[in-house]
């Protein structure tokens, strides 16, 4: 099996690794770098539990090869907090009940990061559209939408 050496940045840290050509980014993050916040869900790109940011854009890591991340900046759920301080989006998900079992939460939070970067003050419909591709099996999405709107308010004000 062909091996490739890749250099990338993960959560602000330089990483160099040798990976098989067909190694999925999700497996590289979880197994090789011990970042279990990137969840394995459907492994077909439908659920969004594996979502991470690649150069600031949300990507489903179960559909992306690790070698494609060469030279890129990857942010996982573990990279959002600053020490003991949660990111405002993480705080909002906790405060508003946007997490139930928590399995989909990392992907929802990462999708929210990308969405609020592109649209700091989304409407309810824009939030629902922006989270399309991220599935939650525990809620009716109302608390997730509320969490995103709360985070928008905390981060960007009126």
Image (cartoon, rainbow, N blue to C red):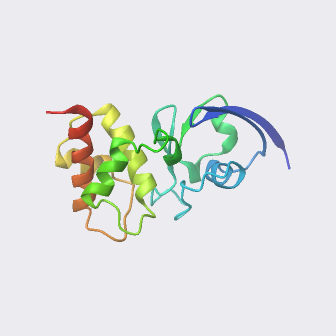
- Residue placed most toward the observer, 82 or 102: 82
Count of numbered circles in the view: 0
Q: Residue at x 59, y 56 (%)?
A: 36
Residue 154 horizontal side relative to residue 38, left or right: left
Spot the residue most to the top.
Answer: 71
The answer to whether residue 39 is above or below residue 3 is below
Residue 32 is situated, as x and y percent measured from the top left of the image, at 72, 50
Residue 63 is situated, as x and y percent measured from the top left of the image, at 57, 51
Spot the residue most to the right.
Answer: 1
- Residue placed most toward the observer, 110 or 90: 90
The answer to whether residue 82 is above or below residue 51 is above
Spot the residue most to the front.
Answer: 84
The answer to whether residue 146 is above or below residue 21 is below
Residue 52 is situated, as x and y percent measured from the top left of the image, at 50, 45
Q: Residue at x 56, y 61 (%)?
A: 40
Residue 145 horizontal side relative to residue 65, left or right: left
Spot the residue most to the left.
Answer: 158
Residue 83 horizontal side relative to residue 142, left or right: right
Residue 109 is situated, as x and y percent measured from the top left of the image, at 39, 49
Residue 89 horizontal side relative to residue 51, left or right: left
Quadrant location, the C terminus: top left
Q: Residue at x 54, y 55 (%)?
A: 37
- Residue placed most toward the observer, 92 or 122: 92
Q: Residue at x 52, y 64 (%)?
A: 41
């Amino acid at each position: 099996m062909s091996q490739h050496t890749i250099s990338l940045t993960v959560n602000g840290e330089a990483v160099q690794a040798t990976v098989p050509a067909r190694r999925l980014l999700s497996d590289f993050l979880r197994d090789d770098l011990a970042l279990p916040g990137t969840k394995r869900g459907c492994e077909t790109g439908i659920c969004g539990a594996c979502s991470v940011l690649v150069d600031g854009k949300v990507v489903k890591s179960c559909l992306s090869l690790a070698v494609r991340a060469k030279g890129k900046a990857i942010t996982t759920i573990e990279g959002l907090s600053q020490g003991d301080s949660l990111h405002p989006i993480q705080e909002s998900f906790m405060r508003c009940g946007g997490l139930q079992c928590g399995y989909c939460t990392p992907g929802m939070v990462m999708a929210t990061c990308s969405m609020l970067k592109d649209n700091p003050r989304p409407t309810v419909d824009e939030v629902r559209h922006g989270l399309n591709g991220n599935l939650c099996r525990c809620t009716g999405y109302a608390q997730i939408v509320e969490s995103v709107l709360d985070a928008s308010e905390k981060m960007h004000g009126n």
